[in-house]
Image (cartoon, grey):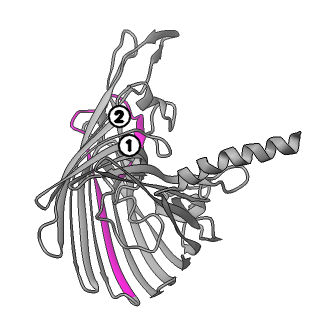
């Protein structure tokens, strides 16, 4: 009886499986990747040091020796990637498609964990498209540096993937973009550390609007505006009592980008005036501008950072590149009521980085080397304007080797 039931179930499921496959096509892609690196000192670097950002500040022991002046190395393969592109049937006049992409960079107690990088479906019409699901943040955009390292220009270039609704419309060579986004893997800092609650409790997504000019031969020019609203706290602990509070911070960021590509030469650049973009791996965040003496309720003010990068590459089989990045802390437009801040390294006055790269590329193979000197000026925040004063510099020299088998 059990065998007959299994046979009957298989016969019933067969037409359903065939119907599901009808008008669908699938293509796999990805790579096996190995990264080896050397640093001359300790750094802020995620994913076990492969996602490099910038060197840490001095940390002096009792004898005045810098504990962070310690070289380190690593060799890892967990950024190996696998993805599936899906093309589906038409829905009216819209072509359907989707993508699922994963790697092993989600860390757990077992060292590495399979994680979702991208997971979305898309509707494409003649002049427009709608994307629903997790993919790259629009601030990352279509203009990104061409680097070997997985950080791809961070902390100068926004690095973030989020669930979103993104609508794009092409109007005579001008591509218009509007998006609403929700945090998931990359989350904001606040009074309780990194948490999704600051956005969830505020009940509003992030918003982005932008435009790109595509009609000029070999060029792409564009700009965009982004806003985020957070609710840092629900309650205030003040003088031994607890008070319910309704606190908010809203911040705006602005970006402009360009790219020129001709034969084997590419020039790309981006500039941002960034506020509260710490969850995109950038230097950013906010501070406290006032404290109510009756109940401890706080008002907040975002830090502003001017960030720019340029990237030049030449070649195809033998490829060389130069990346330059610079970030400056512009402080706040209101005085600070406390030295407490929330974000990424708001005690950095400025940060500059150069990346010299060289790679050898074949249709399914790529190997290369990068040399990255980075200099950071640390200090302390002036409560009058949030700017960093009394600075001192630290430097890191990084050498990274990368090898990929691409399929």
Q: Nearer the viewer, residue 178 or 17?
A: 17
The image's mark for residue 19 is none
Q: Quadrant of residue 337?
A: top left
Q: Position of residue 211 (x, y in %)?
A: 17, 53
Above or below for 202 versus 383: above
Q: Nearer the viewer, residue 271 or 339?
A: 271
Q: Alpha-carbon neighbours of circle 1 within 10 Å: few (<14), some, or many (≥20)?
A: many
Q: Residue at x 66, y 46 (%)?
A: 13
Q: Alpha-carbon neighbours of circle 2 within 10 Å: few (<14), some, or many (≥20)?
A: some
Q: Give the residue number, with chain letter if any, for mark 1.
A: 164
Residue 325 is a magenta residue: yes
Q: Quadrant of the C terminus?
A: bottom right
What SS does tag 2 mark? loop
Magenta-drawn segment: 319-348
Q: Nearer the viewer, residue 397 or 365?
A: 365
Q: Give the residue number, with chain letter if any, for mark 2.
A: 205
Residue 45 is a magenta residue: no
The earlier-in-sequence mark between 1 and 2 is 1
Q: Residue at x 25, y 36 (%)?
A: 384
What SS does tag 1 mark? strand
Q: Residue at x 54, y 51 (%)?
A: 19
Q: Are marks 1 and 2 in contact (CB under 8 Å)?
A: yes
Q: Position of residue 23 (x, y in %)?
A: 46, 57
Q: Position of residue 383 (x, y in %)?
A: 30, 36
């Amino acid at each position: 009886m059990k065998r007959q039931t299994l046979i009957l179930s298989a016969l019933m499921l067969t037409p359903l499986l065939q119907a599901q496959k009808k008008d669908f096509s699938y293509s796999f892609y990805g790579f096996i990747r190995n990264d080896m690196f050397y640093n001359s000192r300790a750094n802020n670097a995620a994913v076990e040091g492969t996602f490099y950002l910038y060197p840490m500040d001095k940390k002096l022991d009792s004898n005045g020796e810098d504990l962070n002046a310690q070289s380190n190395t690593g060799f890892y393969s967990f950024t190996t990637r696998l993805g599936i592109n899906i093309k589906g049937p038409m829905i009216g006049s819209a072509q359907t498609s989707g993508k699922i992409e994963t790697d092993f960079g989600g860390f757990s107690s077992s060292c590495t964990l399979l994680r979702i990088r991208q997971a979305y479906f898309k509707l494409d019409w003649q002049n427009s498209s709608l994307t629903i699901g997790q993919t790259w943040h629009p601030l990352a955009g279509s203009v990104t540096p061409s680097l070997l390292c997985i950080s791809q220009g961070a902390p100068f270039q926004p690095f973030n993937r989020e669930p979103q609704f993104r609508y794009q419309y092409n109007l005579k060579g001008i591509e218009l973009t509007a998006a609403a986004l929700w945090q998931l893997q990359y989350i904001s800092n606040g009074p309780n550390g990194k948490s999704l609650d600051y956005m969830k409790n505020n009940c509003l997504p992030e918003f982005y609007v932008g435009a790109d000019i595509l009609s000029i031969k070999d060029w792409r020019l564009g700009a965009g505006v982004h806003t985020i609203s957070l609710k840092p706290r629900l309650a205030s602990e003040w003088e031994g009592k607890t008070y319910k509070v309704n606190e908010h911070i809203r911040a705006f960021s602005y970006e402009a980008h360009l790219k020129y590509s001709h034969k084997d030469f590419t020039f790309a650049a981006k500039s941002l005036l960034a506020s509260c973009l710490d969850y995109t791996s950038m230097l950013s965040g906010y501070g406290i501008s006032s404290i109510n003496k009756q109940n401890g309720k706080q008002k907040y003010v975002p830090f502003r950072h001017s960030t720019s990068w340029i990237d030049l590459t030449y070649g195809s089989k033998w490829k060389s590149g130069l990346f330059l990045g610079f970030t400056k802390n512009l402080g706040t437009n209101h005085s600070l009521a406390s030295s407490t801040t929330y974000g990424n390294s708001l005690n950095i006055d400025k940060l500059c980085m150069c990346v010299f790269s060289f790679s050898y590329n074949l249709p399914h193979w790529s190997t290369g080397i990068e040399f990255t000197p980075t200099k950071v000026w640390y200090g302390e925040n002036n409560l009058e304007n949030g700017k960093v004063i009394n600075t001192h510099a630290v430097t890191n020299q990084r050498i990274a080797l990368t090898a990929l088998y691409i399929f």
